[in-house]
Amino acid sequence: MNVLVLGSGGREHTFAYQLAKSSRCKNLFVAPGNAGTAAIATNISLSVTDFAAIEQCVLHNAIDMVVVGPEDPLVQGIVDYFAATPGLQKVQIIGPSQKGALLEGSKQRAKEFMMAHNIPTAGYASFTPETLGAGKQFLETLKAPYVLKADGLAAGKGVLIIQDLNEAKDALADMLGGKFGAASNTVVIEEFLDGIELSVFVLTDGKNYKVLPTAKDYKRIGEGDTGLNTGGMGAISPVPFADDALMQKIEQRIVIPTVEGLQKENIDYKGFVFIGLIKVGDDPFVIEYNVRMGDPETEVVLPRIKTDLVAVFEATFKQNLNALDFELDTRAAATVMLVSGGYPEAYEKGEVISGIEDVSGSIVFHAGTAMKDGDVVTSGGRVIAVTSMDEDYKEAIKKSYQNIEKLSFNRMNFRTDIGFDL
Ligand code: AMP
Ligand code: GLY
């Protein structure tokens, strides 16, 4: 099979790395990719939301399977585009239809879906510029802290958690006034859930599903989970506190109703469901759905899947995931993200990265990297994820930190406390 991975981050390098191991993968392409994917696949320069260019690429390279990494093309309907285009209909594309992708594309839609299918989540109400007054009154009925969410995609920045009631009212007015552009034309206000977060990943073919390994990511830039939010500074899988009892509750109360809900609503969904959860006491509640894998969660989840990834995706597309023999590695995985100095605010690009070839016993997944004059250089905020595996997750973390000592670039930054809270 010829396989195309869409995207350019650590997640996509990890997909490519696992797909390249498959004896069934003949030619592997990544679009647009990074310096890491260039070493194991053919990079193709295109925008992941330029469907016409993707069509050309698929036809020109006789691509049989497309794995969609990020949410934007899904929310913009790439799966529907393939379904509607003669010549692309046989291509095994992995991702939900546009209707399915709305679970991530609209917070309000996600809340309505959860309410309709009795999936535990925080109580909420949503407001538009016309109902700003009612929104402020609703805030008065809640206890602090106040959780305000822009309805649409806002590059991970659309959720505000505010302690003071008056500040929350002002923030609501700002959001409805266009703080996040069209993404905050509607704002969801929800109850604050006090607990510990984890993520569960599910792969569904629309009928059957497999629960993939759990993961916990570290979202903030600073030690002790302080400072600005980032795309994710590191991750651990499995989550040590996700014991059998909790996983049973998650499967029964959340995973099964989610997959059945998609079916009941006739939504075509052949792809990943990334379920963000908060454990309150002993009970799981959904805080968000994403319709793709996480980054850097992929860098710890996928290396723990032993089954041939081409076979996994083929079963997903052909809707026979139930028949797939699905094997997981019992070892834990840890990843630590190296980022550009200044990230998540302004940062320099083009810094030469040294030491990659000296790493041993860990996997270097490239995120924001590019080739320049024969050197691997930085080209994004998140630059490299160093993943390690071991029976003991603490040993895995240690291996990543030992290898990070060999890596360097100007103003390289990383958190030294990934996994230390567990
Ligand atoms: P989201 O984009 O919906 O995942 O929200 C971003 C972050 O805000 C989450 O990872 C949580 O840390 C936090 N969050 C979201 N919703 C809630 C909630 N209802 N209660 C407490 N924290 C929340
Ligand atoms: N690491 C969080 C995400 O991918 O959304």
Image: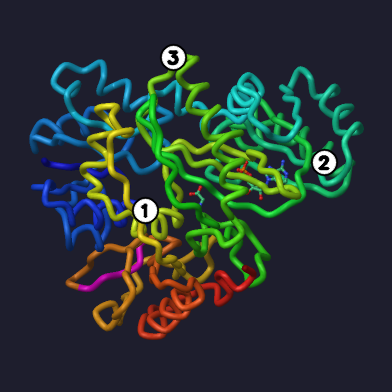
* Amino acid bearing label 1: Arg
What is the secondary structure assignment of the residue under circle 3? loop
Name which quarter of the figure residue 62 lies in.
top left
User: What is the number of the mark on residue 168?
Assistant: 2
Residue 282 percent coordinates (x, y): 72, 48
- In the image, residue 377 lies in the stretch drawn in magenta: yes
| Residue depth check, mark 3 versus mark 1: number of the one nearer the observer | 3
Residue 280 versus residue 217 in the image, above or below: above
As drawn, is 375 to the left or to the right of 367?
A: left
Q: Nearer the viewer, residue 339 or 274?
A: 274
Name which quarter of the figure residue 112 lies in.
top right
What residue is pinned by disc 3?
266
Distance Cα–Cα, label 2 vs label 3: 38 Å
Q: Which residues are magenta?
A: 375-379
* Amino acid bearing label 3: Asn
What is the secondary structure assignment of the residue under circle 2? helix
